[in-house]
Amino acid sequence: MKQTLLAIGCILYTGHAAAISAGEYMAKVSDCAACHTAEGGKPMAGGKAFATPLGNIYATNITPDKTSGIGQYSYEDFEKAVRQGIAKDGHPLYPAMPYPSYARMSDKDIHDLYDYFMKEVPAADVKNKENDIPWLLSARWPLHIWNWLYVEDAHPDNRALKTTAQDKELLARGAYLVEGPGHCGACHTPRGVSMQEKAYDGNSDIYLSGATIDGWYAPSLRNISMSSEELKDLLQMGRSQHGAISGPMSEVVTQSTQYLTDGDLDAISFYLLSFNHKNSTPVAKDGSISYSPTDGKTLYSMYCSTCHGDDGKGKDFTVPSLVNNSIVMAKDPASLISVIYQGAQTPQTKGNISFRMPAYKDSMSADEITNVVNYVRGNWGDGAPPMSKDDVTKYKKAQE
């Protein structure tokens, strides 16, 4: 049954009583709602703001409304917009839309998406917002050059793995979902000077190696220290026996990955766990690297140990473990600072309530947050570098 689901594109979500169309399923895999549905707005009617160094840009209306949406788009127009980033009138779209990843999608999945948007999404006459980029900087013709440089057709992941025929099928499906519609690299891959992802597939060691986005550090997905089942739990429920999702990824779980079929969850976890090399710098045995200021342990005991435990192992399926936690082990402490400073909440998914960690921005000083972070990373960071008070200060200024 699993292989059949993989072969036909996984139309059913087995966790729900009713079947959904192939197009709706692909829209969830591609997480279209995350960008094109504003908070409190109509589904897929656009209006959500995205900050860029040049100013805010706003997601567009992609409902089948013929005036404000894409109701006038032919399949060819739709395919060109999704895969090449070119609108019906010929102007290039801003690459905030991950069309370099969508370029890898199959013809069938693009057709299914088109049918879904034209036949199932309710039309909404919601006009698109003008972007906030100054007109002198808003010229779009340079984006044609950007597309020529960075948008390419998909090519197979050819890493040499000793796998069975079934494993090769899982690897291929997982690579397709992660590199294509799932566009995981948009957050988890570092970006270059032109804001392009430095790599778009698993043939590069840079791909999915971790990146900072919106004040959070999206951790490397190349050194995941958990079982396949635990990884699948995180993607489907937002929490697992020892871990929990927080930050921007919480929205991804709520709107996208909780709807994945078991077959696709198997494929994604197999693909991600196939990156089996792990680069870390061990703590110096001579004690030359100091992670735990004197009061770090005291502060941890006061604020953190009640839930996470003195051993940092948390509570199964409720409080995430700090041991083998990607946020704790990340080179960039931004996500850990953010969780402590503004709190965190696990995703609300079908059949699972959300759990919240309180914010300590009004309870702890910058020095105290620094000490707690260094204590946690010193104990369970697997060689993660220490941070300074300046890191916290910069974060706090960015939130003001």
Image: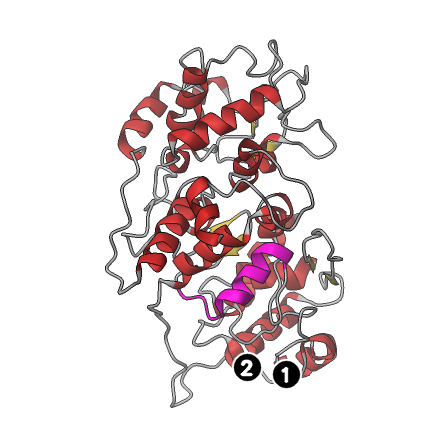
Q: CA distance from mark 1 to mark 2?
A: 7 Å
**Callout 2 secondary element:** loop
Residue 234 in magenta stretch: yes
Q: In x, y percent, where is residue 223?
A: 41, 66
Of callouts 1 and 2, which one flags the residue occurring earlier in the amino acid sequence? Answer: 2
Q: In x, y percent, where is residue 146?
A: 32, 29
**Callout 1 secondary element:** helix
Position of 17 relative to 151 (above/below)? below
Q: Find the magenta span and give its range.
A: 223-238
Q: Give me the disc on residue 354.
A: none
Most foreground residue, 10 or 281: 10
Most foreground residue, 160 or 37: 160
Q: Residue at x 45, y 54 (%)?
A: 268
Q: Is residue 220 visible?
A: no
Q: Residue at x 42, y 88 (%)?
A: 287
Q: Quadrant of residue 224?
A: bottom left
Q: Bin the neighbour count of mark 2 within 10 Å (Cα to Cα): few under 14, some 14-19, many 20 and up.
A: some
Answer with left or right where residue 286 lies relative to residue 306. Answer: left
Q: Is residue 143 visible?
A: yes
Q: Residue at x 68, y 83 (%)?
A: 298
CB contact under 8 Å: marks 1 and 2: yes
Residue type of the residue flagged with mark 1: Lys
Most foreground residue, 263 or 209: 263
Q: In x, y percent, where is residue 144?
A: 33, 22
Q: Give me the disc on residue 297.
A: 1
Task: Name the residue beneath numbered marker 2.
Answer: 292
